[in-house]
């Protein structure tokens, strides 16, 4: 069963929310600049509302864009991804950060383990292929 979109329960239309958040994220605009641009288009929204939407839906939109971008890149024959392993200290303990990175340095998946062994590598590899 699919989850309903969190945008459905707000009074403002999802298109306006997406437009405001994308204007703020994609272009070097301040919240007040986004408010002014929307006002010119006849949309009366406070800059605090745009900030609230950005905090609430920014990661959702970014994940959607990343997912569509990866699906689009996978259709091309030159799409490649590599495994990257980094040693990280968390609270004084050494952990291993496994990352799958595509040819444009976009992180596709990441996984942190305490052990560096075959079992951890295979688990991450299966997770990445999904």
Image (tube, rainbow, N blue to C red):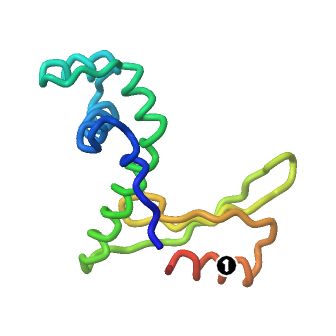
Q: Residue at x 29, y 42 (%)?
A: 18
Q: Is residue 110 left or right of residue 113?
A: left
Q: Splitting the image into 4 quarters, where does residue 42 fall?
A: top left
Q: Give how far across and how far down residue 95 sits, in percent.
A: 77, 60
Q: Give how far across and how far down residue 56 sits, in percent.
A: 47, 39
Q: Residue furthest right?
A: 92
The 10 Å Cα crowd at callout 1, few under 14, some 14 to 19, many 20 or more, is some
Q: Give how far across and how far down residue 124 sits, in percent.
A: 62, 75
Q: Residue furthest left?
A: 41
Q: Residue at x 43, y 43 (%)?
A: 57
Q: Residue at x 20, y 24 (%)?
A: 43
Q: Splitting the image into 4 quarters, where does residue 80 fall?
A: bottom left
The answer to whether residue 16 is above or below residue 104 is above
Task: Please state which of residues 125 and 15 is positioned toward the viewer in this rendering.
Answer: 15
Disc count in the image? 1
Task: Please state which of residues 64 and 72 is positioned toward the viewer in this rendering.
Answer: 64
Task: Please state which of residues 62 and 49 is positioned toward the viewer in this rendering.
Answer: 49
Q: Give how far across and how far down residue 110 sits, in percent.
A: 59, 63
Residue on which disc 1 sits: 121
Q: Is residue 47 left or right of residue 130?
A: left
The answer to whether residue 82 is above or below residue 43 is below
Element type at mark 1: helix
Q: Is residue 64 left or right of residue 125?
A: left
The answer to whether residue 30 is above or below residue 22 is above
Q: Splitting the image into 4 quarters, where does residue 13 fall?
A: top left
Q: Residue at x 82, y 57 (%)?
A: 94
Q: Is residue 41 left or right of residue 104?
A: left
The answer to whether residue 21 is above or below residue 30 is below
């Amino acid at each position: 069963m699919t989850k309903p979109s969190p945008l459905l329960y707000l009074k403002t239309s999802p298109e306006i929310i997406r437009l405001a958040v994308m204007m703020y994220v994609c272009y070097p605009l301040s919240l007040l600049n986004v408010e002014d641009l929307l006002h010119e288009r006849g949309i009366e929204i406070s800059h605090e509302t745009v900030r609230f939407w950005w905090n609430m839906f920014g990661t959702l939109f970014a994940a959607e864009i990343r997912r569509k971008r990866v699906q689009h890149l996978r259709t091309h024959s030159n799409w490649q991804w590599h495994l990257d392993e980094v040693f990280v200290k968390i609270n004084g303990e050494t952990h291993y950060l496994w990352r799958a990175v595509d040819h444009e340095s976009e992180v596709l998946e990441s996984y942190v383990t305490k052990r560096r062994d075959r079992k951890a590598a295979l688990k991450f590899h299966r997770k990445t292929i999904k």
